[in-house]
Image: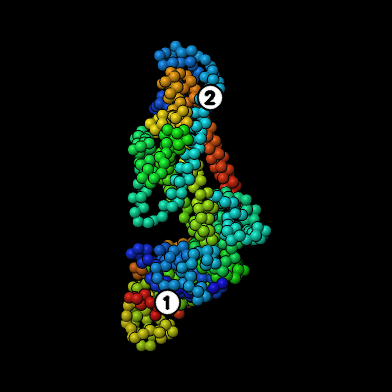
Amino acid sequence: MQTANVNRLTPYLFLAPAAAVLAIALLYPIGYMIYASFLDWNPSQRIGEAEFVGLRNYINLLGDESFRESFAVTLKFAAIVVSLEMFVGVGLALLLDRNIRGMSLLRTLFILPMMIAPIVVGLMWRYMYHPTVGIFNRTLKNLGLEPIPWLSDGDWAFASVIIADVWQWTPFIFILSLAALQSLPQSALEAARIDGATGWQQIWYIKLPLMMPVLVVTCLLRLIDAFKVLEVILVLTNGGPGLSTEILSLRISRTASEFRELGVAAAMSNYLLILLLVLTLGMFLYNKFAETRALRLRAEAEGAAS
Amino acid sequence: MPKIVFDKVEKSFGPVKVLPPIDLTLEDGEFTVLVGPSGCGKSTTLRILAGLETLSGGEIFFDDRPISKLEPKERDIAMVFQDYALYPHMNIAKNMSFALRLARVPKAEITEKVQRVADMLNIGHLLERKPAELSGGQRQRVAMGRALVRDAGTFLFDEPLSNLDAKLRAKMRTELAEMRDVIDKNMVYVTHDQVEAMTLGDRIVVMNEGIIQQQGSPEELFKTPVNQFVAGFIGSPTMNFVEGELLQESDQVWVQGDGYKLPLDAETSARLPGTAPRDVTLGIRPSSLLVDPAAGAPIELKVVVSEYLGAQSVLVTHCGAQELLVETPSDGPIKAGTAQTFGVITREMMIFDKASGLRV
């Protein structure tokens, strides 16, 4: 009896170090942040000296015009970049999913942007966007066209950061989509050809629906990333002109470092966290539901057949 | 329903030649079975016919019309795949109606057709299910149904039963045989299972290493195989082959080898080219060996193992150093380890040239 109990506990003993690391590395900072969001805390204070203000930070933020604008910019940014990247990335994958000479080299080239540090990407694009010596405006000038105020006009600045982000992150979607495409059941595609599907119909009715689970996860990963994007925009526009490109993480960083309101910054982070959690949990629950349903019906089918 | 003609069809994958030029004619309305061991080129042949593989040379004709450049959908074919190849994201009704929907068949007609075929296959109650929610046998039926709904001129089956368990496979085989008689279409069926081939085919094409060994009715293949490969492939349990030598003694030709000497029947002797002696391979079907020594020419065999299969038993015996299978009714128990005399039905023996493997 005694030994049996000990044996049952053995796995937990082995899990304990990992659990401890997880608790310290993951849960502690999150707990710290959640706690801080209930404080009126500035960087000159130790956390114990800060005044506990309950939900005041959260409530104030809801009424804060700049926060709401920043939140809107973030939503707009994330929605646009992720849509564009999904469209271009999946499109490229569909185009390049074939065996022609030099394809592996091309694929490698495509994923290079993703490997460059975001700060470098920001700097690189800032030079390319430069109003007089940047490649874009020089090219436009050579063609006899008006230069574009890439980073100095609010709307253009927003477009510019979107272009840079799409350039850097489309490859991420491209390689995941390509992997998904290449693992599709070949016979289903052959069946579709025999059933009379044209190339487009195969993509629309077979390939895309079958890739959907991967695409959903890819899209979610990109959304999470897009909501947290910071470096490229920091280097390119630093949120300007005005608040036109001030995404949430930039606002959080400025609230903490410039406005010296750590509690408010923590509360903002928590709003972001909640948004992402809802997204993730939603997807997780949906998957879980679909899986259990399929398993149950299949078990019934096997039962009925035997 | 076209007559299908393969005219010197070739296929290579890079430097690897999988099909040497083959010629094959499939008559209108015939159920043809391509059978052979793994890698013999039977699936490739079918996939070339379907348009899923391009051919490297030659041409395929449907009633004198060359079709090798046509897309699969332009060939008026339907196909059942080994792994069923159902569309996992569509329910059964959508799976079965996919081709019809692409062809813009009116909705009411689609519903009617799908329901009719589904009822015929006993899957009418599953139409709302997804493939993942079905058992293996049900999926198999859906795959069959998806092809049948098409009402195509030619049906192709690529080892459709090989993923089922033995019991279900036997059941589906019977149903297929029934269906074959109801549906008057060209059917081309690929399998490695000679029992399927024998029970289903009007005509069987035996392939090995890309080469067509023989084609004909099941009975022709069983009774008059052209070579040792076909003789060994068709029939279960498989034919026994023993090394031997032909001997002429006065009017009688004998085949003699390690531990046996059997008289050759007059008909086979008459076909022998030239004069004995020469080296041959003797083929004896397990069913041609009888427990009663008086029923045929005597042969002394040592029973090593007796495999009881129910009504029948298969005896593994030794004749000298060579192994022979004997198929016998189970009623008279024969103990392993005993040596006894069996009778050989000599007119059912086959003689193969040792070098070429061709039947004499």
Give the image location of residue A139, x and y in percent.
Answer: 36, 44
Front-most of residues A127 and B281: A127
Q: Three-letter amino acid code at disc 1?
A: Val
Q: Secondary structure at mark 1?
A: loop
Residue tagged by mark 2? Answer: A65
Image height of B279 relative to A85, above or below: below
In the rendered view, does B124 fall on the left or right side of B4? right
The image's mark for residue B226 is: 1
Whole-number angstrom distance, CA of label 2 to CA of label 1: 91 Å
For mark 1, name the chain: B
Dot 2: few (<14), some (14–19), or many (≥20) neighbours within 10 Å?
few
Q: Does B335 appear above or below A114?
A: below
Q: Is A84 or A142 nearer to us in this picture? A: A142
Residue at horizontal 45 percent and vertical 36 percent from the top:
A156
Question: Residue at left 41%, top 31%?
Answer: A237
Q: Which one is nearer the viewer's eye here, B109 or B132?
A: B109
- How many dots with numbers? 2
Q: Position of residue B189 (x, y in %)?
A: 51, 66
Tell if the residue under mark 2 belongs to the same chain as the one under mark 1.
Answer: no
Q: State the quadrant of the N terminus of chain B.
A: bottom right
Q: Is residue A295 above or below residue B281?
A: above
Mark seen at residue A82: none
Query: How dense is the environment of label 1, judged by Cα within 10 Å: few (below 14), some, or many (20 and up)?
Result: some
